[in-house]
Amino acid sequence: MKRTLEIKDLHVNVEGKEILKGVNLTVNTGEVHAIMGPNGTGKSTLASTIMGHYKYEVTSGEIKLDGANLLDMKVDERARAGLFLAMQYPNEISGITNSDFIKTAMEARLDSENHISLFKFIKELDKAVSDLKMNSDLPHRYLNEGFSGGEKKRNEILQMKMLKPNFAILDEIDSGLDVDALRIVGENVNNMRGENFGAIVITHYERLLDYIDVDYVHIMMNGRIVKTGGKELIKKIDLEGYDWIKEELGIEDVEVEKRQHVVLGSCAINKKNEAKK
């Protein structure tokens, strides 16, 4: 059954500064959408807001999942509802192995009476590790501890493959990857395509999209999606950059937002809802 993630006129503040200024986007399962744009245009802010980072204050607009208000859900509720975020800066967690972390996350989606077969879990995990060409000792290592940047990004995709979300938001998973790792990650994402899976792929560069078959390409500038098209946009951006879009639409450069190393915690704050309480 098709599921729908819908964003309407979304405005978001970070520490009192408006970053998203009216984002509109609809993603259905079975579709892969790429969001591209210069640094500081709000791409990572959008990803974190969808997943519920507490620093991102929704001042107006809506995010709905199959018609239900996503902004009323906490981070864990959004994950159990079928959302997944591959973070730009995955965190290291000492004392928790990869296998324990992933198995616990998978069981959190089940009823309290149901459990995952250990044999089935190990078999599936070993296959996913092999698909991503990761070291075989990875299940026994602490989560991201001592991992290179590229290993952390592969580990995010490993979690996605095991959790099988309905919607994955992939925030610059190509950064820090060498050519071979980029191909492996891209192919594994592309192999997830299907009627029960939709994705938002956030990237600066076209190289990752050589391996992922995207349906729509959106260009984000100054906190809005300013242009939508197909794969032809990827090639044009690769050849000409973004200046042609600025000239075409009369967009002026604005101050670039500072990049933030974010950690998901409480849900994103909806200012409108808070005012009603």
Image (cartoon, rainbow, N blue to C red):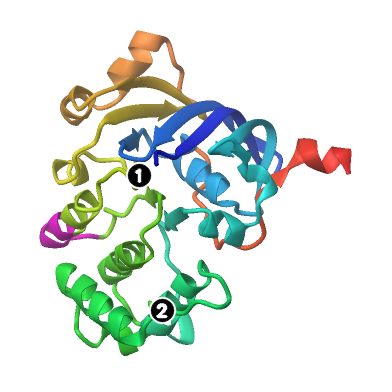
Q: Residue at x 38, y 77 (%)?
A: 144
Tell me the quarter of the image containing the N terminus. top left
Which range of residues does the magenta coloring cover? 177-184
Tell me the quarter of the image containing the C terminus. top right
Residue that mark 1 sits on: 199
Q: Residue furthest right?
A: 277
Q: Residue at x 52, y 58 (%)?
A: 79
Q: Note whether residue 102 is visible.
A: yes
**Observer-nearest residue: 81 or 41?**
81
Query: Residue 94: x percent and y percent?
Result: 47, 86
Query: Residue 105: x percent and y percent?
Result: 48, 72
Task: State how many labels appear.
Answer: 2
Query: Residue 267: x percent and y percent?
Result: 66, 54
Q: Gap in Å between the C-alphas at discs 2 and 1?
A: 26 Å
The secondary structure making up most of the magenta span is helix
Query: Residue 15: x percent and y percent?
Result: 69, 45
